[in-house]
Image: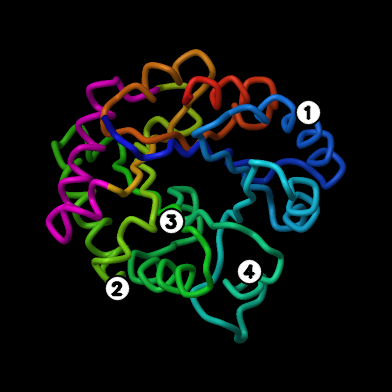
């Protein structure tokens, strides 16, 4: 039986003002206070990070950013660095979400630098990987995952691989209501773990591979019961504290 603690992270995307975030966290905290053995994280927009760090302090809820730049500083209007996030006492950061890749041209080369910059700053990275619908239909899922894992983790020393959580997010399931079948999710998670094992069997056993893509309170338990799925990166359902807490409970 795996000793990996499940990670349930809620990606709010571009939702919630500070006032709305404060209302959410006050509703969430009592609902997850007894969720022993589960790591819980919320990922607010940049504007609400400091407020959520303060409001969640002393609780089991961690706070992750949704993105960061790979460099320490520079002429990069609109970006923030790992050091800036660490200064806020942010716990981690999502990197390489498919929306960042598709809408803003985020490359695997930049992500390799982002992952190492996050680790150097003491942040816990969640590296997102996943295939499009057309890639799955062509049978290219494993090729796409192999490329994203090898590139994204290429600069991470083998002994640090387990410090990076890998979120398998099939692009065709994000925000669509479509969910990978348990077999699809397990096959992809097991393949990702096998890729990690190619560099370090010990680190692969410790690394957390989580699933993202239309996760909700109704389907979470089945997905989280899979042997190689160690949690969930939750989108729309994470905006509701009751539903998000139900997903956390399903992970216990």
For residue 204: magenta?
yes
Q: Secondary structure at mark 2?
A: loop
Q: Which residue is mark 4?
A: 86
From the image, tell me which residue sits under label 3. Answer: 96
Lower position in the chain sequence, tag 1 or tag 4: 1
Q: Earlier in the sequence, mark 1 or mark 3?
A: 1
Lateral position of residue 162 relative to residue 84, left or right: left
Image quarter of residue 114: bottom left
Query: Which quarter of the rendered picture does the N terminus lie within?
Result: top left
Distance of mark 1 from mark 3, alpha carbons?
A: 29 Å
Between 153 and 99, the one lying in front of the other is 153
Label 2: how many residues lie within 10 Å, few (<14), some (14-19) or many (20+)?
some
Marks 2 and 3 sit apart, C-alpha to C-alpha, by 15 Å
Sooner in the amino-acid sequence: mark 4 or mark 2: 4
Residue 123 in the figure: left or right of residue 164: right
Please, which colouring scheme is shown? rainbow
Task: Find the magenta span and give its range.
Answer: 179-205
> What residue is rendered at 51% in x and 34% in y?
38
Q: Earlier in the sequence, mark 1 or mark 2?
A: 1
Decide if residue 195 is on the left or right side of residue 116: left
**Which residue appears at 34% of the width and 21% of the height?**
225
Give residue 27's mark. Answer: 1
Image quarter for residue 23? top right
Q: Using the numbered discs, state the Cα–Cα distance from disc 3 to disc 4 in whole angstroms.
A: 19 Å
* Position in image of residue 58 (x %, y %): 73, 47
Q: Position of residue 243 (x, y in %)?
A: 63, 21
Residue position marked by numbered label 2 in the rendering: 155
Query: Which numbered disc, 2 or 3, marks the residue that appears first in the sequence?
Result: 3
Measuring 53% from the left and 40% from the top, which residue is drawn there? Answer: 39
Quarter-of-image position of residue 68: bottom right
Question: Of the residues under marks 3 and 4, which one precedes in the sequence?
Answer: 4
């Amino acid at each position: 039986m795996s000793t990996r603690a499940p990670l349930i992270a809620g990606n709010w995307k571009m939702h919630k003002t500070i006032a709305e975030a404060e209302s959410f966290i006050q509703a969430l905290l009592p609902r997850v206070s007894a969720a022993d053995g589960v790591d819980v994280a919320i990922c607010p927009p940049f504007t609400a990070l400091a407020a959520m760090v303060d409001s969640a302090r002393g609780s089991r809820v961690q706070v992750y950013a949704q993105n960061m730049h790979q460099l320490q500083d520079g002429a990069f209007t609109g970006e923030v660095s790992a050091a800036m996030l660490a200064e806020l006492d942010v716990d981690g950061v999502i990197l390489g979400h498919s929306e960042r890749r598709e809408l803003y041209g985020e490359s695997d080369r930049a992500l390799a630098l982002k992952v190492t910059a996050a680790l150097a700053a003491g942040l816990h990275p969640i590296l997102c990987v996943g295939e499009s619908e057309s890639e799955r239909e062509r049978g290219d899922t494993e090729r796409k995952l192999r490329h994203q894992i090898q590139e994204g983790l290429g600069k991470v020393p083998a002994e640090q691989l387990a410090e990076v959580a890998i979120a398998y997010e099939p692009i065709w399931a994000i925000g669509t209501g479509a969910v990978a079948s348990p077999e699809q999710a397990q096959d992809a998670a097991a393949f990702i773990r096998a890729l990690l094992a190619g560099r370090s069997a010990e680190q692969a056993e410790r690394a957390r591979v989580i699933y993202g893509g239309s996760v909700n309170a109704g389907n979470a338990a089945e997905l989280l019961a899979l042997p190689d799925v160690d949690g969930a990166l939750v989108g729309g359902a994470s905006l509701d504290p009751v539903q998000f807490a139900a997903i956390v409970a399903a992970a216990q």
